[in-house]
Amino acid sequence: MNDMNASLFLRTQCANALRALSMDAVQAANSGHPGMPMGMADIAEALWRHHLKHDPADPHWPDRDRFVLSNGHGSMLLYALLHLSGYDLPMDELRRFRQLHSRTPGHPEVDVTPGVETTTGPLGQGIANAVGMALAEKLLAAEFNRPGHTVIDHRTWAFVGDGCLMEGISHEACSLAGTWQLSKLVVFYDDNGISIDGDVGGWFTDDTPARFEAYGWAVVRHVDGHDPVALDAAIDTALTSDRPVLVCCRTRIGQGSPNRAGTARAHGEALGEAEIALTREALGWRAPPFDIPDALRDAWSAREGGASAHRAWQQRFDHYARAFPELAAELRRRLRRDAPLASDALRALEAACEAAEARAAAVATRKASQDCLHIVAPSMPELLGGSADLTGSNLTDWKGHRPLKGEGTGNHVHYGVREFGMAAVMNGVALHGGYRPFGGTFLTFSDYARNAIRMSALMKLPVTYVFTHDSIGLGEDGPTHQPVEHAASLRLIPGVDVWRPADATETAVAWRAALRRGASPDPGPTCLLLSRQALPHAGDGTPRIDDIARGGYVLRAPRDEQVCLIATGSEVAIALRAAEELAAEGIAARVVSMPCVEVFERQEEDWRRTVIPRHLPRLAIEAGRTAMWWKYVGERGDVVGLDRFGESAPAARLFDLFGLTPPAVAARARALLAAGERA
């Protein structure tokens, strides 16, 4: 065997090691997806053994390449790659694939398995995360690299399948990637023509290469996904591109399986012992299950090469740090996953809260949000704002911001009408590190972004969602644009903090909480639900900033209280005026503002019971679904809200129609007291 043939044989055997581990692990679990790992094994070998820059000893090395398995159902391919490359993922974990508390869950999960860059499984979101990672790399390189000192210089690689490209989010994100000219993004398309229901020719007939060329990508067509030489040539071409690259690889799902390859049965079920035996014979694979010959282990190990690349980078960074010590210190701070806010930013956040309280102005909370950004953003260079084509309505920009449009750089992204893509791209930016992303749209359109918000929560990412026009208060646009169920729906997602502030001060405190959360013991995303209409200042001069930060607090506490009114957002002003009306009749009403239910629930029980006393009749007021509030008012309490869609009319008419006015709330409070007396 000549050297060329020996090299190709070794590469084929390295790919077969991936196939064997994948089919064995799926068989042991009797659950999983062997087809994609077996079909993409040759592509994975070409990338991971010959091009991917990574250090298995340090999965968080800042200048490593990022690898995203967007078709996350093929997770065993990634686990096999990580194990063989030398990451801290022992063979026992592969044997425990899909088992409770293993480090090899059914779909890849960041922070569970070393080397996994993002949690994937919901198809299409991984490629959108990859776009966000590539954007972050581009922006960081422009911000921190200096002539003769290149410390940010890595690529983002992604695997995608037909399902990823069928999902609409792939259009949103990949269109942006082309517009932004993300030249260090390379995506391998596993064109195997099979999905769960069978041959995709009956439901997916897109000209995918032409589609991506229309986005402005470079496309490498007609690559044999099982030919190492063709794959090497395709990757070499990709590395010379000044645009994002799609490498279209024709593959067979379940490659190597005599009776399952090329069929839907290879996709999502174990091959079975008999078929695995036939596959071993067809591949010439003689090793028993979960056993890799030493020669192949040596060929796969990336520890030495990874350590060498890491050392070379560290030397470059050390030179950079000597030449630019302040830049180096800032870059180190920002690349930490739990990056603490700089002292200037912390002071700016405090100043924003104090300024809003001192001003005591009536202002829409969306405008109060922008006022906060005017103060804070200049002290937070890591802020990366944006909006889904609603900048002038969401007010997510600030004085001195630099708009990111086209192939340039900036710190406020114009995402266009792409809510889902925006949210998933922001997840990728947060995962990459270096920036704190936030993005805006109307609250009713949070539905478009919902699954990406859920992924933010699942991954504990400090992404901030600015959702304006938060109720029927937006008025004439009508029920298509008026949120009713959205606040309640977002509160259902574990790990999401949903703030609905009542005035400018509560808005500034909400921003402070959102931006501090990344370095907190309980990181995660924050949703800010902000009003279109002006809201009056809710304070009465009593210090309250620290109380607001606890999620729920007492705004008014008259002597000899008889009833407790609990409200959020624009309805706090209604509750305060209703309390004044009741006071004129001799009825003392406590008023509680509940800007963030989730934060309130994290407080100690004594605080919660002090804020909402159980001995008082309780009435909750919020312009949305009522179901959640019964927990706080009890079966003898009452809730004023909306359990139907809105109408098209001026806001004042709508609040009157739905009983969300001070007289109507006061009447409900009187009825609640009367019912208690009868009981």
Image (cartoon, rainbow, N blue to C red):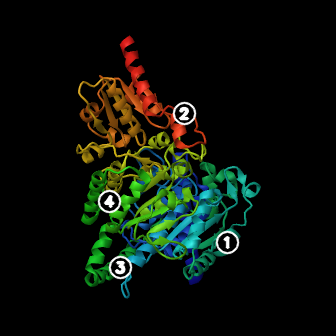
**Foreground disc of the pair 1, 3:** 1
**Tags 2 and 4 in contact by the CB under 8 Å rule?**
no
Label 3, label 4: how many angstroms apart (C-alpha)? 23 Å
Asked if residue 103 can be seen in this view, the reply is no
Residue 98: image x %, image y %? 48, 48
Residue 394: image x %, image y %? 48, 57
- In the rendering, which numbered label is found on residue 657? 2
The residue at which mark 4 appears reads as: 338
**Tags 3 and 4 in contact by the CB under 8 Å rule?**
no
- In the rendering, which numbered label is found on residue 313? 3
**Foreground disc of the pair 1, 2:** 2
Q: Nearer the viewer, residue 321 or 669?
A: 669
**Foreground disc of the pair 2, 3:** 2
Callout 2 crowding tier (Cα within 10 Å): few <14, some 14–19, many ≥20: few
Callout 1 crowding tier (Cα within 10 Å): few <14, some 14–19, many ≥20: few
Numbered disc 2: secondary structure: helix
